[in-house]
Image: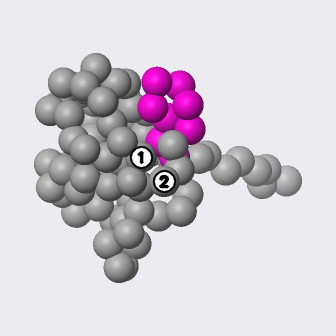
Amino acid sequence: MIKVKFLTMLREIVGEAVIETEKKENIALLTQHLCQKYGKKFREAVLDEKGQIRNYVRFLINGKEASDPETKINDGDTIVMFLPVAGGSNG
């Protein structure tokens, strides 16, 4: 089993901060699994029109950034998945 923590908008879409799920081989397969589980809104947030992980989606595995979709996941890992938040002012 692995833990997946969702931050920012992904937490709102999923409706949970943390889930436990069966280990997947890599980031790409985990993302596909989560898209099937959480549906269209989640899929549109994390995948582009070609089905590739959007370049701004961020993953941390045990606290270390993992930018390659082929990054291996090990049993017991904690994955944090989030979309960076941009801020600004209206003034």
Q: How far across and down, in percent of the image, does residue 5 sit?
A: 37, 29
Residue type at the position of mark 2: Asp
Figure coloring: one colour
* Classed neighbour count for the residue bearing mark 1: other residues with Cα under 10 Å, few (<14), some (14–19), many (≥20): few
Report the side of 89 relative to 10 (left or right): right
Q: Quadrant of residue 17?
A: top left
Q: Nearer the viewer, residue 26 or 6?
A: 26
* Classed neighbour count for the residue bearing mark 2: other residues with Cα under 10 Å, few (<14), some (14–19), many (≥20): few
Give the vertical position of 51 relative to 74 (above or below): below
Q: Nearer the viewer, residue 4 or 64?
A: 64
At x 18% / y 24%, what residue is drawn?
1
Residue under pointer 2: 68
* Farthest right residue in view: 91
At x 55% / y 31%, what residue is drawn?
64
The majority secondary structure of the magenta stretch comes to strand
Magenta span covers which residues?
58-65
Residue under pointer 1: 71
Q: Nearer the viewer, residue 18 or 15?
A: 18
